[in-house]
Amino acid sequence: MGKLRFVTAGESHGAGILAWISGLPAGLPVDLERVNLELRRRQLGYGRGGRQKIEKDLADVMAGVRHGRTIGAPIAIRLENKEWETKWKQALPVEDFEGSEAARRPLTAPRPGHADLAGSLKFNLHDARYILERASARETAARTAAGAFAKLLLGEFGIEILSHVVAVGHARLERSAAWEEIKAVCANLESPLRCVDAETEARMKAEVDAALRAGNSVGGIFEVVAHGVPAGLGSHAQWDEKLDGRLAQAVMSVQAVKAVEIGAGVENAVSYGSEVQDPIGYDAQRRRFVRPSNHAGGLEGGITNGEDIVVRGYLKPISTLRRALGTADLSTKEAVEAAYERSDVCVVPAGGVAAEAMIALALGDAFLEKFGGDSIEETRRNYLGYQRQIDEF
């Protein structure tokens, strides 16, 4: 089990979403404005549904932080669901009450592509409500909160993690994005789809508009870049220590992500070796080995090599459609139209923010594996000692 651990709890329409994170060193400064900014970023994006206007996610830190710093204890965070009291408390009570049967909101028409049917079969439930409530991407709010704390840790050592949108539907950015471009578009909270190219973003908006008019949904590709990561995180020694595998699992676990790419992995697979291996040079002034290209995405042999880590997530169109697909009722087994729950049309930018959080947590875990430290001061001493070792290599 890794040094940095986290779990989440809560249902989409329950009283709230919870995150628990353990393993952060004591003394880490905690800026709640930055944590809440990450939560806000997750809610933005062209094609998001009405719920984002209702939920004003703010991190209620209940444990593990005192006087603006971590104390070495587990951190507990609560995000309130605003509609619980008014719309869902009677439908999803912790304990039954007189008349509670009539207040239920059962869902027996499972949506193709969602966890509804598979989860109902697994847990022997004829009401998919209990599956969809937990399977909902609302859970990524808790991951984003936990990931924000991992970002605070990594930021102490000059590591930044941001994302941008590469494709929405058939509209795709056909060039690489520079780090400064990604920083600029992420700083602009008014950017509709967080694409670094205005003309491409306009075509992406048109894809979302077309899907909305058709009662459909649209997916796409986001790219997460971790900048300033030192060489030496992860390991080649065992399969489950390889950092590229851990990053791939972290991003694949985000709802609706169906493929993950490290660096130029897809293009590399159909190219010759001489075209995709990154030559090695040495910068005497910086006293660092350098690469003129980064097809490997910052990882070789499961170990970071000092270049930017680049991970792409391929997000399928979300499963809830206004123009419902055919399904079979869980109870009657008759052919019906799939249920419709209020939903988004496009969530690619939000998926990128959730993936940032997951990559921050995976990198934070690998960072603490490497440098340890029960206090941030101890972690820093270990880190600086390693940097001297690299300088003298």
Image (cartoon, helix red, strand yellow):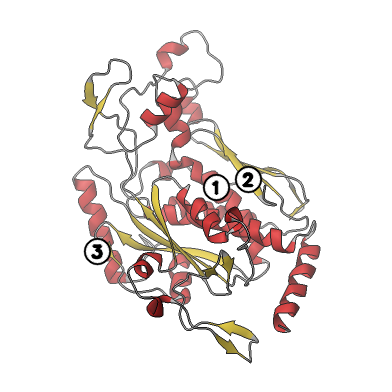
Q: Determine if residue 10 is in view.
A: yes
Say if mark 2 contacts mark 1, CB within 8 Å. yes
In front of the other: 107 or 328: 328
Q: Nearer the viewer, mark 1 or mark 3?
A: 1
The amino acid at mark 3 is Arg
- For marks 2 and 1, the one nearer the N-term is 2
Q: Residues within 10 Å of mark 2 (few under 14, many from 20)?
A: some
Q: CA distance from mark 1 to mark 3?
A: 30 Å
- Left or right, 179 with respect to 342, comes to right
- Judged by depth in the image, the label closer to the viewer, 3 or 2, is 2
Residue at screen point 24% across, 56% down:
207
Q: Nearer the viewer, residue 333 or 281?
A: 281
Q: Which residue is mark 2?
A: 6
Secondary structure found at label 2: strand
Q: Residue furthest bottom?
A: 284
Report if residue 189 is visible in the image: no
Residue 86, compared with residue 373, is above or below; it is above
Dot 3 crowding, Cα within 10 Å, few <14, some 14–19, many 20+: some
Residue under the point 40% across and 80% down = 274
- Residue 146 horizontal/vertical position (percent): 60, 49
State the CA–CA distance, disc 3 to disc 2.
38 Å
Q: Which residue bears the numbered disc 1?
A: 143
Instruction: Confirm or deny contact between disc 1 and disc 3 (CB under 8 A).
Output: no
